[in-house]
Amino acid sequence: MKGPRICTRILPLLLLGACQAAEIPTFTDLDETTVRAMFDSTVSWVKAGDWTSWSQQFSEDGVLQPPNAPTVVGRAALLAWGQAFPPVQDLAFTDVQVAGEGNMAWGRSAYALTLAGAPTDTGKQLGVFRRTPAGQWQVVAVSFNSDLPVPSAAPPPPTTTAR
């Protein structure tokens, strides 16, 4: 009857080992460099009008929240949004900050965007990134908005002077 006794002693140890929490991968300096490089690639692709490469860095269900426009969801919709975007004369990201934990990362930056024939717009953005099971970083979500004031729909009320 040693067989059943050994099973009753070994089985709980095996189950205990199976119940241990999975180790969370470390967010390394290389991960930070990789995510930061995605900001640089975005600038290059947008300035070149390479919306295919730009959209491919997003996950299949990636989300973009542009200012004053509906949310764009999915890689195909992101590509269509980019292809419909006005020609970009210049784009720069400054003050890029990247951090992460395990398979998730986040980054923020300021931006300066000049569209052909338009004044330069400045603003900020926040991006969320996820490492795939294959180890590749993808953009999960980006939200950006302008620092320029929203134009008023109605003119300001007239000022009156006391006489």
Image: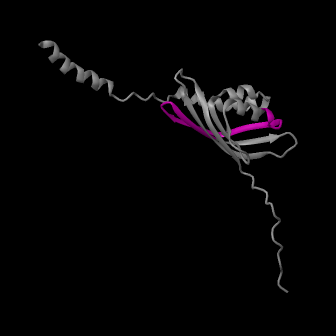
- Quadrant in the rendering for residue 94: top right
| Residue 107 included in the magenta stretch of the image | yes
Q: What residue range appears in magenta?
A: 83-108
User: Which residue appears at 86% of the width and 39% of the height?
Assistant: 116
| Residue 154 included in the magenta stretch of the image | no
Left/right placement of residue 65 relative to residue 157 reads left
Left/right placement of residue 33 relative to residue 87 reads left
Judged from this view, the residue extending furthest toward the left is: 1
Is the magenta region chiefly helix, strand or loop? strand
Residue 12: % across, % down: 23, 24
Toward the viewer: 51 or 161? 51
Q: Is residue 35 above or below residue 70?
A: above
Q: Is residue 156 above or below residue 68?
A: below
Toward the viewer: 128 or 77? 77
Q: Is residue 26 above or below residue 91?
A: above
Q: How is the image coloured?
A: one colour
User: Which residue appears at 76% of the width and 37% of the height?
Assistant: 91
User: Which residue appears at 27% of the width and 21% of the height?
Assistant: 14
- Quadrant in the rendering for residue 1: top left
Residue 51: % across, % down: 75, 29
